[in-house]
């Protein structure tokens, strides 16, 4: 299927104040166990899917967006409910969509665990996906 034929997915924060659209053409996906992802989500890890930044657009609630970081690397949260929607990464060229904020089901699934060297000690990874101490090689 060509990228142009891929369907648009919708996503939103908990309260619905911020909504986005993203093409179902993700390039990679992982479960990140780094301390920053754990803190920003309040969970053991952040399942995310990566895509070029220009393939995601805000469709509602621009005034309710809170950015944490600079133009080249920041997290996008809802100012009202605090939900982490996505992170701008890799010099501002890509976004890591927090998969839990997707309303529609993406075709991609996380295929690895990254930064398990700093994972929460109270969490046990119980699936058979490959594990990397830091970034995947």
Image: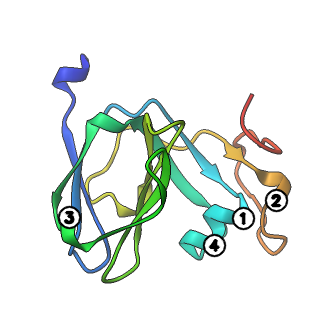
Q: Quadrant of residue 16?
A: bottom left
Q: Residue at x 71, y 58 (%)?
A: 34
The residue that disc 3 covers is 62
For marks 1 and 4, give the CA distance: 6 Å
Q: Residue at x 69, y 47 (%)?
A: 113
Counting residues from the start of the chain, the first of labels 2 and 4 encountered is 4
Task: Decide if residue 99 is on the left or right side of residue 116.
Answer: left
Is residue 123 or residue 73 the one in the foreground? 73
For marks 3 and 1, give the CA distance: 28 Å
Q: Quadrant of the C terminus?
A: top right
What kind of element bears circle 2? helix
Question: Is there a contact, CB below 8 Å, between mark 1 and mark 4?
Answer: yes
Which of pointers 3 and 1 indicates the residue nearer the eye? 3
The residue that disc 1 covers is 35
**Visible residue check, residue 127:** yes
The residue that disc 2 covers is 118
Which label is found at residue 39?
4
Label 1, residues with CA under 10 Å away: few <14, some 14-19, many ≥20:
some
Question: Is there a contact, CB below 8 Å, between mark 1 and mark 2?
Answer: yes
């Amino acid at each position: 299927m060509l990228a142009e034929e891929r369907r648009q997915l919708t996503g939103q924060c908990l309260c619905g104040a911020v909504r986005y659209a993203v093409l179902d053409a993700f390039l990679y996906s992982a479960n990140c166990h780094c301390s920053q992802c754990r803190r920003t989500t309040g969970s053991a890890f952040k399942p995310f899917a990566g895509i070029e930044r220009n393939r995601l657009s805000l469709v509602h609630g621009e005034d309710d967006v809170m950015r944490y970081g600079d133009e080249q690397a920041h997290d996008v949260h809802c100012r009202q409910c605090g939900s982490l929607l996505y992170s701008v990464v890799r010099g501002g060229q890509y976004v890591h969509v927090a998969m839990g904020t997707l309303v529609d089901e993406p075709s991609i699934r996380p295929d690895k665990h990254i930064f398990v060297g700093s994972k929460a000690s109270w969490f046990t990874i119980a699936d058979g996906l490959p594990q990397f101490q830091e970034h995947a090689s």
